[in-house]
Image (cartoon, grey):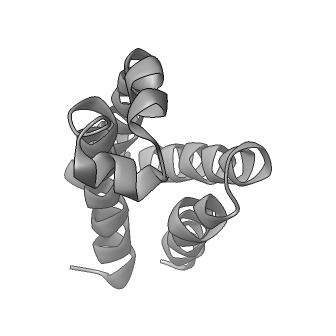
């Protein structure tokens, strides 16, 4: 397996993890700790977080689709990595700078590696 595909797979796994945190653990201690939320904040934003988690699942699914595709896989990976990068930059600007390093930077590295192979 190429290094680019390993990085894409790790990014997909990361987004599955984010899906689990946002959809199922948001109001649990581990979810609240991950996002720095109080019990009340988690309770009032739980539905919104589940929606966000679903979108992260779509990103992971697209990356996995790209990995499983043979001829068209590169274009699919580039598209979904670009989506992850844009989401990461937007999240860093609007929610938390940490998202730049957790989401956008890995996507940028993945894009670079896919483009180089």
Left or right, residue 49 beside residue 27: right
Q: Residue at x 31, y 55 (%)?
A: 12
Can residue 28 be seen from the camera position used here? yes
Residue shown at the point (70%, 62%) measured from the top left: 97
Q: 55 and 28: which one is in front? A: 28
Residue 46 coordinates in the image, percent (x, y): 38, 23
Picture layout, residue 47 above or below residue 74:
above
As drawn, is 56 to the left or to the right of 91? left
Left or right: 19 with respect to 36? left
Most extreme residue toward the bottom is: 3
Residue 79, given in percent of the width and then of the height, sits at: 54, 44
Name the image quarter holding residue 50.
top left
Which image quarter is the N terminus in? bottom left
The reply to whether residue 52 is in sight is no
Rendered residue at 49%/53% (across/down): 36
| Residue 54 image position (x, y, % from top left) | 34, 26
Q: Is 83 placed above or below 6 here? A: above
């Amino acid at each position: 397996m190429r290094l680019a595909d390993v990085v894409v797979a790790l990014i997909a796994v990361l987004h599955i993890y984010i899906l689990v945190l946002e959809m199922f653990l948001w109001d649990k201690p581990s979810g609240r700790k991950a996002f720095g939320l109080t019990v009340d904040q988690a309770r009032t934003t739980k539905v919104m977080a589940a929606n966000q988690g679903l979108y992260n699942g779509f990103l992971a699914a697209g990356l996995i689709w790209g990995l499983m595709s043979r001829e068209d896989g590169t274009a699919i990976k580039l598209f979904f990595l670009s989506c992850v990068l844009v989401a990461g930059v937007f999240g860093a600007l609007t929610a938390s700078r940490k998202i730049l390093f957790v989401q956008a930077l890995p996507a940028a590295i993945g894009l670079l590696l896919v483009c180089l192979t």
